[in-house]
Amino acid sequence: MATSRSTPRLRLTLLLLTGVVVLVAVSERTAAVGLGGQLLQLAGLVCMATAALGRIWASVFIAGYKDTQLVRHGPYAALRHPLYALSLLAVLGMGLSTRSIAITAALLVAFTAIYLLAARAEDRLLRVAHGADFDRYAAEVRAFLPRWSACEVPDAIEVRPRILWKAFLDAGSLLGLWMLLVAADSLQRAGCTPAWITLP
């Protein structure tokens, strides 16, 4: 695997998500059971599917241009970090899918910190690369809270499929993660894995 600036963040993400799947498999979660638990898992799927589709859409605009241009159209006209914002929506979905208030809160706190740090580092790199253009962009467009009225979608853009395909793998991995969480939960509720701890 090639190492990039995001490699440590991706490794930490993989470690945390693996831990969550294991925690779901070995914990009894009492916050929502029966129909309430199923509705939470469905809401989690909706959040994760929306995030997956949104990440593909955002990637159409930035794939292949991230290191060479200051992208200011599409979702990047509404907020500076749509991929991180959509990732937080996916994290909310993961948390809801666990049926645990404690796991959901812990995931949101951890990943908000991770993505805020990543966004600040990215802003510093963009400021160095684009100077005053980035400063104007940052003054006009908020980092995480979208202003959808500013979203401009051009009639045509050049798409780089060799880079964009990674967004489809990313989307598939989010949906695969949801299936893993639900499977781990089902195994635990069926008594196939031990309930070593109880979580709200």
Image (tube, rainbow, N blue to C red):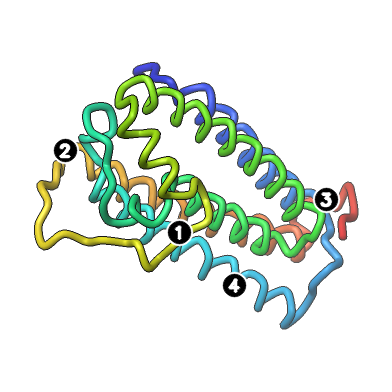
Residue hosting label 2: 162
Q: Which mark is residue 51?
A: 1
Residue hosting label 4: 43
Question: At numbered mark 3, what does the secondary structure look like: helix, strand or loop?
Answer: loop
Q: Quadrant of residue 96?
A: bottom right
Q: Quadrant of the C terminus?
A: bottom right
* Residue 190 screen position, x and y as percent: 75, 65
Residue drawn at point x = 42 percent, y = 49 percent: 141
Q: Quadrant of the N terminus?
A: top left
Question: At numbered mark 1, what does the secondary structure look like: helix, strand or loop?
Answer: helix
Label 1 crowd bin: few (<14), some (14–19), many (20+), radius 10 Å: many
What's the CA distance linking mark 4 and mark 1? 12 Å
4 vs 1, front mark: 1
Along the horizontal axis of the image, is 16 left or right of 178? right
Residue 93 versus residue 181: which sits nearer the camera? Answer: 93
Q: Residue furthest top?
A: 3
Q: Quadrant of residue 139?
A: top left
Along the horizontal axis of the image, is 182 left or right of 198? left
Three-letter code, disc 3? Pro
Three-letter code, disc 4? Ala
* Residue 34 screen position, x and y as percent: 76, 79
Please tell me which of labels 2 and 4 falls first in the chain. 4
What's the CA distance linking mark 1 and mark 3? 32 Å
* Residue 147 screen position, x and y as percent: 44, 62
